[in-house]
Image (cartoon, coloured by chain):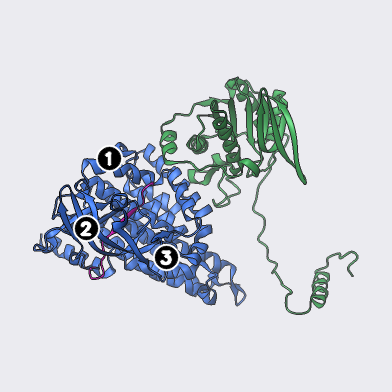
Chain colours: A green, B blue
Amino acid sequence: MNILVFVKATIDRNAPLDPDEIFPGDRDDKSDVMTNNYDKNAIEAALRIVEEKGEGKVTAVCLGSDMADKVVKEAIAMGCHEAIRIENSKTEITHFYSVAKILAAAAKKVGEYDLLLFGMQSYDYGTATMAPMVSEFLDLPLACWVEKVAFNNEKVTVDKVIEGGIRKIELQLPAVLSIASSGDFEEPRYTSVRRIMKASKTVVPVWEIVDLGVEEQKPSVEFDDIEEPPARTEKCVIFDDGDANELVGELLGALKEKGLNLGAFK
Amino acid sequence: MKQLTKIFKTFNFDKEAQEQNEMILDMVYELAMNEIIEKEQDWDEEGAHFDPATKNVSYPSGMMDLYEKCQQNDLFSIIVPEKYDGFGLSYTLWNAVIELMARASLAFSMFFPSQGLNIEIIDKFGTPEAKEKYLPLLASGDAIGAMAFSEPNAGSDISAVTTKAEKEGDSYYLTGNKIWLSHGGAAGTYITFAVTDKTAGPKGLSAFLVDPKITKENMEVVGIEEKMGLHGSITSSMALDRAEVPKENLLGKENDGFRLILGSLASSRIGIAAQSVGISETALQESINYSMQREQFGRPIGKHQAISFMLADMATKVHQARLLYLSTAHMKHMGENTQIESSMAKYWATELAQKVTYDAVQVHGGYGYSRSYRVERLFRDARVLTIYEGTSEMQKTIISRGALARAQK
């Protein structure tokens, strides 16, 4: 069982916010960069599948600048057998359509695989579009938000999260799955000292986008500007002292005073 | 976390070691801040257990599950030589791990300094058989390492121990009482010392590695201490009644135990300084968070100079203490003698922790005195730091003697 798991470098949620440095490649300090946390669920799924099968290989694939080295090394330190980084320092391609094209081309270049795994979304933009787009480009079956997998010959049956429940579907391998952060793969494993020592000695191959035969697509969305929202000046007023009925009246009165349209509440 | 890794960048680690350090610290931080800190309040409330009928001790619920995660992540093997299933990494890293663990729970961090001291003493003074047998067990964490130094009448004056060791055939048989044993009854190795020549004073003491699998019921827990803080950690009194120690478990030479143990304590003192920085860092962070939320006189209290200056003092103290313990640990990693510097780091960092946790309660006002707030526990837990592994007064004695000796040279 050969599994490719796609991992993304994002800005650490604890790092200071800077509208001019929204991509990992913009940052000078590696400690500002972290693995997209949802991708760790995908790594956990990949490792568990291979462990349970007793054979196979997990390769982590990451599109990013050298700031993303930390992310591919972490994937190895979690247990991935190999990793590939696709160099993305010059243009810092971030529009989703192009990224998906590049990832699909990388999968094609690897050639042999049974599963392509993604986190259910990214921590930063959260579009959850990579798995669907890559499956479309490679013409492979897709299941998103997968909580559980069971294999039967050339097929995989998955439990996917839908609103209000679980839907079981069967897919022909190879297939593309996005892994939910709930269910069987909810708790990704930690790295360990032993695997960290191995990761630090592993030389991760770096592929160039031009070698993948992908032409850069015109972005469908462009960022004009990104800025911090203005600081809020309104004070929070809490109505908690007195009878509930009277308090509701006071609240509505205060809202009315602010000029809000209260509709039926007059 | 950034403060810690920033200091690491100033040390002479090569690129590969630097990367390993950062990845290991990231992993420990995640484990400490995602899981261990969540349990800290429950452990404090539940405390450790002792069953007088079976003489068994146990840690509060869930603590061993997290201990097992530390085992799975190979955390106890950091400073163990590669030959004995370890990774032979630096004391600098090891002590930073202790700091991160103490940020989450001082009680949980108690697993680390004594493990480190067991590893170091056995590696330095153990017989080849003892190293072969016990270092892999300590590296995997399958054995918890404990220290049994204090006795009812031998505290700071550890030369006053009365536990005696009688040699018969290929074994020593130890008889006496030991108190203040962290992990006593739960540990897999105990380092202790006993009188082998009662006419020679401190020069008649020998150090031993006691294995409870060999002593069996001849070493047992008498009781556990109800303490002001550190409730989650086991602190036992133990009685040895002709407890067998095979001659392979003698550490160093016979009658050389006092010098050997005294020399080794410098190492674990760096770990106590690291614990102090961990607990102080959490007290600081709790105070910053609270002071930005709590509003009085129309603005967050952190924006009032009285509180903001207090926070500035706390942050400076934490940074100062961190520099002290990390530079001492790195000196040790570089093979320097750190006898005096370790005492300085222990003395200064543990005293600063008193002030930082005290101020953290003050910043929280009435809430700081409530058990529902973390700073109340931090204040209670921190109190022991200036006492165990040598009181502040003992550290000052060591420092002043050292300073005088240096001045005379």
Q: Is residue A247 above or below residue B241?
A: below
Q: Residues within 10 Å of mark 3 (few under 14, many from 20)?
A: many
Q: Secondary structure at mark 1?
A: helix
Classify residue B231 as left or right of residue A160: left
Confirm whether residue B78 shows in the render: no
The N terminus of chain A sits in image quarter: top right
Stretch in magenta: B142-154
Residue B230's label in the rendered image is 3
Q: Quadrant of residue A135?
A: top right
Confirm whether residue B364 shows in the render: yes
Q: CA distance from mark 2 to mark 1?
A: 23 Å
Q: Is residue A3 above or below residue B44?
A: above
Front label number (1 vs 3): 1
Residue B132's label in the rendered image is 1
Question: Mark 3 touching mark 2, by CB under 8 A?
Answer: no
The three-letter amino acid code for the residue at tag 1 is Glu
Please give the chain letter of the residue carrying mark 2: B
Rendered residue at 23%/68% (across/down)? B154
Residue A83 placement (x, y as % from top left): 52, 30
The three-letter amino acid code for the residue at tag 3 is Leu
- Asked if badges 1 and 3 are on one and the same chain, I answer yes
Residue B151 placement (x, y as % from top left): 25, 66
Q: Which residue is mark 2?
A: B174
Residue A255 placement (x, y as % from top left): 81, 69
Q: Residues within 10 Å of mark 1 (few under 14, many from 20)?
A: some
Q: Secondary structure at mark 3?
A: loop
Residue B345's label in the rendered image is none
Q: Is residue B242 magenta?
A: no
Q: Is residue B147 magenta?
A: yes
In the image, B192 versus B354, the foreground residue is: B192
Rendered residue at 55%/52% (across/down)? A14
Rendered residue at 14%/52% (across/down)? B254
